[in-house]
Amino acid sequence: MYSQGLIGADGRTTETPEFLQAFQKRIDAEDKIEPKDAMPEGYRKTLVRQIGQHAHSEIVGMLPEGNWITRAPSLRRKAALLAKVQDEGGHGLYLYAAAETLGVSREEMTEELLSGKAKYSSIFNYPTLSWADIGIIGWLVDGAAIMNQIPLCRCSFGPYARAMIRVCKEESFHQRQGYEIVMTLAQGTPEQKEMAQDALNRWWWPSLMMFGPHDADSQHSDQSMAWKIKRFTNDELRQKFIDATVPQAEYLGLTVPDADLAWNEAKGGYDHGPIDWGEFWRVVKGHGPMARDRIKARKKAWDEGAWVREAALAHAEKRAARKIAAE
Amino acid sequence: MTETPLWEVFIRPRNGLAHKHVGSLHAADEVLALQAARDVYTRRGEGVSIWVVPSVAITASDPDHAAENFEPTADKIYRHPTFYDIPDDVGHM
């Protein structure tokens, strides 16, 4: 989007106190920042990192679910899962396009993902062991993603906000199809209900970790809030997610795997037990059970698709040459 | 690494409305760009017609010149119908 002349452009700005103040004034007035506007280098860098990570998460997120497409239990489920995984690919594309408006190229971002320099959501480094995981991912993982993404529709950077509006419209089907899968299992045979419970047990805590470290330990939060890239803190969003999700689990007759979970009348929300941040950081640093497989799969797709990209470009050149010759 | 060209995508939501910019994508040529635009931007009945334009073909105004470009229009209030006083007796005009 509008990235002509921007890719590889020098993003440096002379950041006088007046410039920074004027920029903050625009942000405070809820003015949207568009790609060619002058912006502090830190703002640009934060967005490139965040949108890039977000795009990578969509693309890598296709892998754990793609794993179950051929084994979906019915044609209805298969068609829905295919559509969902295709959506995730589309979401990755909207986001890469938004990041490109900031002067980074798709190729650079792809290289950063494959080399391990860029991160993606660590939730996708967990394995999908049973069909119930597909339901739980739609319900919890997409549910958590929606909590994160709805405020991003009001992000101060125009292209990111616009991409998020499209993404959010599409995600609500993802969460509903997931919940329907879990509901079918929870209302099925005792074995099926057990499958659903087992998947909930494994995905609950990683889903809470998707919101990131506690506010006190979050290194990017304050500046991102001031720049209105973020609208709510990690803990605020996590709380909203828990409050929305616990009644949905109760409806299904499933138990959230947290012995300390309790309704707190005074704060009007649930209190929850301690999150294992040791596990979170291990997975973020690439020690998740599936981390190597995920990057290996992306690298294979990129390498083995190289000839297709090259052939398409060669064909386009040949057609263009023929067209010129015919004129 | 060879870079695949960037295209801007415009979609007409339904006949009677103008094409509107919806996003961008990479494709080797216009045929593949149209195909990709259909797959990426019209999965839920978003449109009935697609334009794809090479991003390099777009010339944009410079936001640094936004003030001199667009602000002068704000003080030309005589360009708006409400600037002119017409008695109520004349009726709707």
Image (cartoon, rainbow, N blue to C red):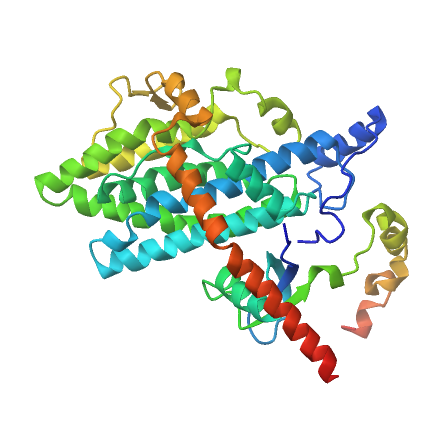
Please state which of residues A38 and A126 is positioned toward the viewer in this rendering. Answer: A126
Count of numbered circles on the image: 0
In the shown orientation, is residue A294 left or right of residue A234? Answer: left
A13 is higher (above) or lower (below) than A4: above
Please state which of residues A324 and A151 is positioned toward the viewer in this rendering. Answer: A324
In the shown orientation, is residue A78 left or right of residue A147? Answer: left
In the shown orientation, is residue A63 left or right of residue A323? Answer: left
Q: Which residue reaches farthest bottom? A: A326
Where is residue A38? Give x, y as percent.
78, 39
Where is residue A88? Give x, y as percent.
44, 50
Q: Residue at x 78, y 34 (%)?
A: A12
A200 is higher (above) or lower (below) than A306: above
Residue A116 visible? The answer is yes
Residue A151 visible? The answer is no
Q: Residue at x 73, y 32 (%)?
A: A41
Q: Residue at x 28, y 57 (%)?
A: A78
Q: Quadrant of the C terminus of chain A?
A: bottom right
Where is residue A270? Give x, y as percent.
34, 23
Where, by quadrant of the figure, is residue A240 drawn? top left
Where, by quadrant of the figure, is residue A132 drawn? top left
Q: Residue at x 88, y 54 (%)?
A: B69
Where is residue A5? Give x, y as percent.
76, 51
